[in-house]
Every structure is written in structure tokens, then in C-alpha cells.
């Protein structure tokens, strides 16, 4: 059987996965602090019919060999953690990270998760939580009589209570950084969890240890460039069509050979 059929089949599968990555990027173009993915391709094993560097005759070395590829596969997807645009909201509990780092939140099972989504809210008990109700770590308590909240660039949270003129510090928002953030496990809900590939978190105050600073009253937008993704989608579509054309051509060659026998 013509091996080109199988090679093109791997190309169709790879382009299908590439299109899935692109569609997910476009679907999240308005998701707060979403980080776009990039598919990483890898060629498959080669069938070596003549090894490069072998001898064609005595003292005659082959400058090149004869190796036939067997296709391609999507080896990984990489997250691009570059900053998105910053949208000014004016809301006091909206916080954006300008630079590297993640907010720490506690999951219901007691494990730590990490997010770039700083659209915080207050729970019924006055704790600072995410839109999904996960408590920001370390916990920050805001009393009901608070009239003003200030979140500084270094993460210090200060409040002004009713009838009091001075600001009172109630906590600090720390950030967590990773040696390899692309190794984090994306679990949905704008959350990531630590893996062996990401390394352990490096926790510190914003502005220290290569961590970014905080901006109050703004949110980080998705870093998806819709025009770039649309161009990638067209390129992927054309590559899919070309692989389909190869299958049609290989099938035509096989049909011609069979008819001549």
C-alpha cells in the first residue's frame, strides 16, 4: 500500500488538533487573563533505506542517505504567558498583575491553585474571593463597616472604616512565580496547578523576586490576537486541504496501477 496514504493521515490528524487549539484561543478571546496556546509539532520516525555516511564503494562515503519520513504529530501545546492588554474598570476589587506571577487561591479540596484573573469579590463573611468563590491566599478579611479599599502595587491591602480617617492595613496579596510556567496544568476556571514540570512556587511580595506589581482598578485581558489566530486558521485549513489532496493523488496512482495489471 502506498505509504503516502498513512503519512497524509498523520498530517490530517495533526491539522485537526491544531484547529482545535486555534478554536479554543478564539473562543477565549474575551476571557479575563486567558493565555493562548500554541501547538508544537514533531516529525515521526524515519524509514532508513540508505544511511548517510555509509560507504557506496571502497573509500567512497555517501554524502547523504535515503530516509523516508512517516509523518507528523502534535507533541505538545505551549501556553504563552505574555501579558495581555490592561482594561481599566475603576472597580476597587479588580486587580491586574503587571509582569510575572500568579494569585494564590485555595481549592475546596485544600490544595493550592494559581490564577491571573484578579476580578475579586467579597464573600458573605467578608473574605476576598475569586468569582468562583475560592479564597485568596493568604486570606484577607474586609469588615462590613469599610468604606474604602486600597490595594498598593506591592500588594498591601489597606482599608478605611466608617468614622475613621486613617487607613488601616488588613493584609497583603502575595504572588507566586514558577521557573517554568508553561509546565503548569491548566484545569479550567482560569486556574492552574503545580506540576513537576513547572517546579515549586516561588512566593513573594509583588515587585520582588522577578514578580510583577499589582494595578488596582484594572483587569488583564486575554493575550489572544484574533487576527493572528484567523491567519493561523486559514493556514491550517490549507494544510488540511493539501494533505487531503495527497491522499486523493495516492489513491489515483494506486487505481491506475491496478487498472494496468
Image (spheres, rainbow, N blue to C red):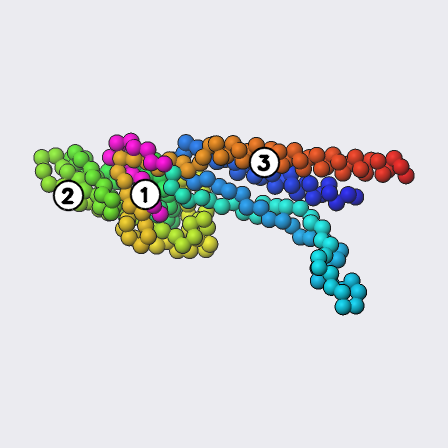
N-term mark: 1 or 3 = 1
Q: Is residue 15 located in the magenta-colored stretch of the structure?
A: no
In percent of width and height, residue 210 lies at 33, 52
Q: Which mark is residue 202?
A: none
Near-viewer residue (62 or 32): 62
User: In the rendered image, which residue does mark 3 sit on?
Assistant: 236
In percent of width and height, residue 205 lies at 27, 51
Circle 1 — which element? strand
For the residue carrying disc 2, how many other residues have a C-alpha within 10 Å: few (<14), some (14-19), or many (20+)?
some
Q: Residue at x 24, y 47 (%)?
A: 154
2 and 1 marks in contact (CB < 8 Å): no
1 and 3 marks in contact (CB < 8 Å): no
Q: Residue at x 82, y 35 (%)?
A: 255
| Quarter of the image with the C terminus in it | top right
In percent of width and height, residue 125 lies at 24, 38
User: In the rendered image, which residue does mark 2 sit on?
Assistant: 168
In percent of width and height, residue 30 lies at 41, 31
Q: Is residue 101 above or below residue 189?
A: below
Circle 3 — which element? helix
| Quarter of the image with the N terminus in it | top right
N-term mark: 2 or 3 = 2
User: In the rendered image, which residue does mark 1 sit on?
Assistant: 98
* Residue at the limit of the structure toward the bottom, as seen here: 59
Magenta range is 85-100
Amino acid at each position: 500500500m502506498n505509504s503516502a496514504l498513512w503519512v497524509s493521515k498523520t498530517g490530517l490528524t495533526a491539522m485537526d488538533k491544531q484547529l482545535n487549539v486555534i478554536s479554543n484561543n478564539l473562543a477565549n478571546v474575551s476571557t479575563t487573563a486567558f493565555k493562548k496556546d500554541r501547538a508544537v509539532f514533531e516529525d515521526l520516525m524515519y524509514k532508513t533505506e540508505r544511511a548517510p555516511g555509509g560507504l557506496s564503494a571502497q573509500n567512497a562515503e555517501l554524502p547523504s542517505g535515503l530516509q523516508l519520513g512517516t509523518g507528523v504529530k502534535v507533541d505538545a501545546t505551549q501556553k504563552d504567558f505574555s501579558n495581555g492588554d490592561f482594561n481599566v474598570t475603576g472597580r476597587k476589587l479588580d486587580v491586574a498583575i503587571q509582569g510575572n506571577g500568579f494569585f494564590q487561591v485555595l481549592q475546596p479540596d485544600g490544595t493550592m491553585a494559581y490564577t491571573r484573573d484578579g476580578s475579586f469579590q467579597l464573600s458573605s463573611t467578608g473574605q476576598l474571593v475569586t468569582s468562583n468563590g475560592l479564597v485568596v491566599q493568604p486570606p484577607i478579611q474586609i469588615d462590613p463597616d469599610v468604606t474604602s479599599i486600597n490595594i498598593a502595587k506591592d500588594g498591601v491591602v489597606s482599608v478605611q472604616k466608617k468614622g475613621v480617617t486613617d487607613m488601616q492595613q488588613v493584609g497583603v496579596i502575595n504572588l507566586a512565580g514558577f521557573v517554568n510556567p508553561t509546565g503548569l496544568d491548566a484545569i479550567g476556571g482560569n486556574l492552574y496547578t503545580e506540576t513537576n514540570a513547572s517546579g515549586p512556587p516561588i512566593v513573594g511580595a509583588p515587585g520582588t523576586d522577578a514578580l510583577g506589581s499589582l494595578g488596582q482598578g484594572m483587569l488583564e485581558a486575554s493575550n489572544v490576537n484574533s487576527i493572528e489566530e484567523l491567519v493561523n486558521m486559514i493556514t491550517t485549513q490549507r494544510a488540511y486541504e493539501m494533505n487531503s489532496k495527497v491522499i486523493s493523488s495516492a489513491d489515483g496512482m494506486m487505481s491506475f496501477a491496478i487498472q494496468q495489471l
